[in-house]
Image: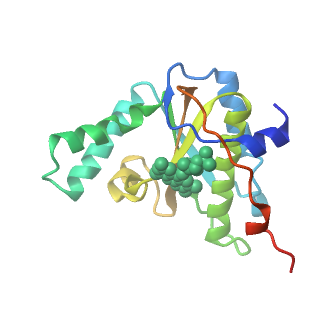
Amino acid sequence: MDALDALHLRSSVPKLSDPLPSQVMLDNIYKAAFRAADHAVLRPWRFLIVKGDARRRLGELFVQAGLDGDAELDDSAVEKLRSKPLRAPLVLVCVSSYKPHPKVPEIEQDLSAGAAIQNMLVAAFAQGVGAMWRTGSLAYNPVVKSGLGLSSQEKIIGFLYIGTINGGTKQLCDPDLQSCFQDW
Ligand SMILES: Cc1cc2nc3c(=O)[nH]c(=O)nc-3n(C[C@H](O)[C@H](O)[C@H](O)COP(=O)(O)O)c2cc1C
């Protein structure tokens, strides 16, 4: 796909299913992260690949986090947490990994990590692979963070769900350029 088409037409895919995209496609997605704008080339990110049975372990961690916040959670709420990672064959836990630097404050490193995720979304779309960036309260939950082995300097900035597109893709409207771009 033409690069501008990918940038102009990308959309998120909430409904994802098996099969897992090929390793070549996944590596193309991962490589795109490295081309995010990155002040001082710190690579202030890392990504945990959660697929296969690891998704069930992540689901159990989500349950643990949910029960830690509310021991009275009912069965359906527990089941909802447990099944979250099963919404796609692959979940990338996207971690902004702050590296102290005299010229690069934490916000710039978070932005760079976010840009890496956006690059991966576009790389997925360009190959016909479905993807969606999600967070929710679990991304900011201390039980989830420690269960995934994050350091105190790190934060989860997204769960990137990746898989085969299941269903149609949405109709896009033409962007209203003037609403966001004005002469100064
Ligand atoms: C940091 C971040 C967190 C997000 N978290 C969620 C989420 O938890 N649930 C959700 O439905 N959409 C979430 N979104 C939005 C979707 O990823 C998506 O961008 C949105 O539905 C618009 O669709 P589009 O990407 O096709 O324009 C998040 C987006 C960002 C940038």
Identity of the residue drawn at 74% across and 50% down: 174
From the image, which quarter does the C terminus lie in? Answer: bottom right
Looking at this view, name the residue that lies furthest to the left.
72
Color encoding of the figure: rainbow
Indicate the position of residue 105 as horizontal and vertical percent values: 66, 73
From the image, which quarter does the N terminus lie in? Answer: top right
- Left or right for 48, reference 42: left
- Give 140 or 1, whichever is nearer the viewer: 1
- Give 33 or 98, whichever is nearer the viewer: 33
Identity of the residue drawn at 44% across and 24% down: 52
- Left or right for 2, reference 131: right
Q: Is residue 94 visible from the viewing direction of this image? A: no
Q: Is residue 121 above or below residue 155?
A: above
- Give 106 or 25, whichever is nearer the viewer: 25
Q: Count up the numbered dots.
A: 0
- Give 1 or 158, whichever is nearer the viewer: 1
Identity of the residue drawn at 40% across and 53% down: 145
Indicate the position of residue 36 as horizontal and vertical percent values: 75, 52
- Left or right for 87, reference 62: right
Identity of the residue drawn at 43% across and 49% down: 149
Q: Quadrant of residue 97?
A: bottom right
Q: Quadrant of residue 101?
A: bottom right
Looking at this view, name the residue that lies furthest to the bottom.
184
Indicate the position of residue 146 as horizontal and vertical percent values: 38, 53
Q: Is residue 134 above or below residue 102?
A: above
Q: Is residue 177 visible from the viewing direction of this image? A: yes
